[in-house]
Image (cartoon, grey):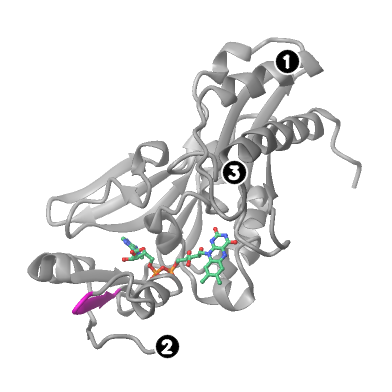
Amino acid sequence: MTIPAFDLLRPRTVAEASRMLLDHGEEARPIAGGTTLVILMKQRALRFSHLVDLQSIPGLDRITETDGGLSIGALATHRSVERSPVVLRRAPALAHAFSCVGNVRIRETASVGGNLAHADYRLDPPPVLLALDAEVVLAGAGGTRVVALEDFYRGMYETALEPGELLLEVRVPRAPAASRTVYSRFSSLSANDWPCIGAAVCLSLEGERMGELRIGLSGVAEAPLLAAGLGRFRQERCSEELWDAVCAAIDEQISPVSDLRGSADYKREMTRVLVKRTLQGQARPAPSP
Ligand SMILES: Cc1cc2nc3c(=O)[nH]c(=O)nc-3n(C[C@H](O)[C@H](O)[C@H](O)COP(=O)(O)OP(=O)(O)OC[C@H]3O[C@@H](n4cnc5c(N)ncnc54)[C@H](O)[C@@H]3O)c2cc1C
């Protein structure tokens, strides 16, 4: 399969990249790892006369620890996140989610910014980032702004990115005290296929009672989703009834679409199963090392 001809523009700074994107308007698109964009262009699903190569801008691939949290540059590859000692220490569920993507060849090339900006509804990393209350740093001609990841997604393949704007960094704050985050995915085709459903649960327990609870989901709506209103379960005693009530609250918020990985009804039922099992596993004491 060939790719239609295009000009590859190689900016040295974010400001230059942004200007190039604005100059060429709808005819231009940023390219990072190219794992999605190149396929879509080869399939003639998308056509651009200019691609702005973000890999020519130095310094956008750093992963650093920040006051108990993380800063992940948009050009960091999936593989570098998966293997980063800082990520493994601060947010092991995030390393796990990135390790679930496709195969090693994809993960060696695909970037964090490309994953989030693509805004597919079935991605692995966004549920964990949503559960961990992550923010994204966006930069363009109008300056730099920080957007909560839950506000970044606007719909199917739609984000808060304005024309000429780039995603520069993902900021993951320090996790809530005594919390544990777990990412579970369910694939209905093969084990290394895209997830049918992804669920990340960030939960802290206060004795036998619920402390903080945040649940990020993918595959269950037009875009990755942070479950709303779970604060009302705080201080309730952990029990099967409580997990059922949490699942019922989530059921009201999701709107799965039927696709080759399952019908909307099947996905709704599997969301309940996956979330409940993850909560049950989370409420058990962690196995001793
Ligand atoms: C075979 C295969 C299997 C896969 N399996 C999975 C899976 O199991 N789970 C999963 O989550 N994903 C999966 N993916 C998707 C994969 O995660 C994405 O292809 C990858 O994350 C895209 O990153 P990239 O750097 O290659 O982006 P690109 O292809 O370069 O770009 C993707 C989109 O993001 C835009 N973009 C890129 N970087 C930026 C930026 N910094 N700012 C603004 N816009 C930007 C581009 O303009 C383009 O629209 C799979 C992909 C393939 C090809």
Q: Residue at x 25, y 77 (%)?
A: 51
Is 187 a magenta residue? no
The picture places residue 68, in percent across and down from the top left corner, at 55, 43
Q: Nearer the viewer, residue 150 or 262?
A: 262
The picture places residue 254, in percent across and down from the top left corner, at 52, 31
Q: Nearer the viewer, mark 1 or mark 2?
A: 2
**Residue to which mark 1 is pinned:** 242
Taking the image as shown, residue 211 lies to the left or right of residue 283, namely left
| Image quadrant assignment for residue 260 | bottom right
Q: Residue at x 53, y 22 (%)?
A: 252
The amino acid marked with disc number 2 is: Met
Task: Classify 17 as above or below 117.
Answer: below
The amino acid marked with disc number 3 is: Ser
The amino acid marked with disc number 1 is: Leu
Q: Nearer the viewer, residue 123 or 61?
A: 123
Magenta-colored segment: predominant secondary structure: strand
Badge 3 marks a residue whose secondary structure is loop
Badge 1 marks a residue whose secondary structure is helix
Task: Classify 126 as above or below 16.
Answer: above
Labels in figure, total: 3
Give the quarter the ligand 1 occupies.
Answer: bottom left
Report, in whole angstroms, how far the alpha carbon at label 3 lies from the one at label 1: 27 Å
Taking the image as shown, residue 12 lies to the left or right of residue 184, namely left
Is 49 a magenta residue? yes
> What's the mark number on residue 1?
2
Report, in whole angstroms, how far the alpha carbon at label 1 lies from the one at label 2: 52 Å
Badge 2 marks a residue whose secondary structure is loop
